[in-house]
């Protein structure tokens, strides 16, 4: 018969019909260390612990598998919100700090302080709206970058319902405008929520995106009307685009402005982050246009969100914290200025930086106009 070696290195017969001749059934197990009656108390305890761990692993795997199979989805039960902060009126920009210095995303832009922004009329506010824009004065030297503005709210948030009433979005070749929330000093550890963002002409619609540290993915059941662009939210994965969702064409740019803008509502809670876009004229009645109305909206009545980022495979509370509201208009940079984007995708002329330096009048439409921002928090 064939012979082989076991893991102890001894040669034994491979006869499947019986034990080797020296095998004594009467003595089987009487002196073996594998016989339970010969185990020490310490061995018994170790085996018991091992069995318990194995059972726990099997149960957890079964539960997770069951959730995945059943299409697990968070319980977005209604929350009772109360108005916390309102950004509106003549003092709109008093609630923000002006970022200065080199652009972190390599834009061909100079972000200016409050005094310079006022001097060049780049930020101003009245009773009805606030404007933030790119300099379009032909007399300004823009050979090293054009003047623009980036503001960051002094107040920070860890959750809430955010209502952004936007009258006009910036657009035009080289532009990269965004309305977003982040903790820039702790990025991407504390996350980033892009509520409105696009580049160049912006006529393909708004892009809503999350950028996070590792272990946050959206490869799960979602309820949204937008088009998924990517499911991995990790900010440094792939081409670093985060997990984005594309909105309809009228959600940004000239098409958005032609309908009088609209309202973006972003709900951020432990269960997930959701963003709704409501064109002007289709804003839910529980989102009052009158900022003196302090009644709270109810997202549970709004239907499916434009972008849905459930917490099924992403711990929202650990990935998003200490967020400020940020509004800016970048020029060129690591997205809008890429040749594959600026020239190939959007058909913009020449080199992006040359266009910025030599075409002041092209930025007449490159401005944000906000009616109000309102922040509600759950009781």
Image (spheres, rainbow, N blue to C red):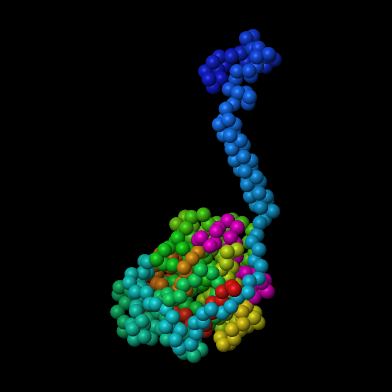
Where is residue 326, by image quadrant? bottom left
Residue 254 visible somewhere in the drawing: no
**At 55% across and 17% down in the image, what residue appears?**
5
**Relative to 376, is 321 above or below?**
above
Pick the residue in front: 225 or 158. Answer: 158
**At 60% across and 58% down in the image, what residue appears?**
312
Residue 313 lies, in percent from the top left, at 58, 56
**Relative to 47, is 288 above or below?**
below
User: In the image, is 344 to the left or to the right of 43?
Assistant: left
Where is residue 146, by image quadrant? bottom left
Q: Which residue is the extreme one toward the bottom?
A: 127
Pick the residue in front: 71 or 24. Answer: 24
Q: Does the magenta stretch include residue 194?
A: no
Chain part drawn in magenta: 298-319
**At 50% across and 85% down in the image, what residue appears?**
88
Pick the residue in front: 335 or 181. Answer: 181
Residue 368 lies, in percent from the top left, at 47, 80
Q: Which residue is the extreme one toward the front?
A: 41
**Relative to 17, is 373 above or below?**
below
How many marks on residues? Answer: 0
Residue 320 visible somewhere in the drawing: yes
Q: Where's the N terminus, which quadrant?
A: top right
Residue 175 lies, in percent from the top left, at 43, 73
Residue 99 lies, in percent from the top left, at 37, 74
User: In the image, is 305 to the left or to the right of 140?
Assistant: right
Where is residue 24, by image quadrant? top right
Q: Which residue is the extreme one toward the top?
A: 21
Q: Where's the C terminus, which quadrant?
A: bottom right
**At 62% across and 78% down in the image, what residue appears?**
297
Q: Is residue 303 magenta?
A: yes
């Amino acid at each position: 018969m064939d012979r082989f070696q076991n893991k102890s290195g001894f040669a034994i017969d491979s006869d499947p019909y019986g034990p080797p001749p020296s095998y004594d059934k009467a003595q089987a197990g009487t002196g073996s260390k594998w016989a339970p009656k010969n185990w020490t108390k310490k061995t018994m305890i170790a085996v018991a612990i091992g069995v318990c761990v194995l059972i726990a692993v099997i149960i957890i795997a079964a539960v997770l598998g069951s959730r995945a199979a059943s299409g697990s989805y968070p319980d977005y039960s209604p929350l009772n919100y109360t108005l916390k902060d309102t950004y509106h009126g003549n003092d709109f920009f008093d609630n923000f700090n002006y970022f200065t210095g080199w652009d972190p995303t390599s834009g061909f832009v100079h972000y200016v302080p409050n005094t310079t922004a006022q001097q060049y009329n780049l930020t101003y506010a009245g009773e009805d709206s606030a404007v933030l824009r790119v300099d379009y004065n032909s007399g300004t030297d823009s050979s090293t970058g054009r003047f623009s503005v980036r503001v960051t709210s002094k107040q920070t948030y860890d959750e809430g319902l955010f209502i952004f009433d936007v009258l006009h979005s910036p657009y035009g070749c080289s532009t990269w405008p965004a309305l977003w929330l982040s903790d820039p000093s702790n990025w991407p550890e504390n996350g980033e929520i892009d509520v409105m963002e696009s580049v160049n002409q912006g006529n393909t619609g708004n892009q809503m995106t999350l950028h996070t540290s590792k272990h946050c993915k959206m490869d799960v059941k979602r309820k949204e009307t937008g088009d998924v662009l990517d499911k991995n939210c990790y900010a440094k994965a792939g081409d670093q685009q985060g997990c984005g969702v594309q909105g309809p064409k009228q959600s940004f740019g000239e098409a958005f402005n032609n309908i009088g803008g609209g309202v973006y509502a972003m709900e951020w809670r432990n269960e997930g982050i959701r963003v709704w876009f409501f064109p002007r004229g289709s804003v839910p009645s529980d989102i009052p246009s009158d900022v003196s109305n302090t009644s709270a909206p109810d997202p549970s009545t709004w239907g499916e969100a434009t972008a849905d980022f459930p917490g099924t495979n992403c711990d929202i509370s650990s990935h998003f914290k200490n967020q400020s509201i940020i509004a800016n208009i970048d020029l060129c940079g690591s997205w809008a200025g890429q040749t594959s984007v600026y020239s190939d995708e959007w058909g913009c002329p020449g080199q992006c930086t040359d266009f910025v330096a030599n075409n002041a009048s092209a930025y007449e439409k490159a401005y944000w106009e906000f009616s109000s921002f309102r922040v509600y928090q759950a009781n």
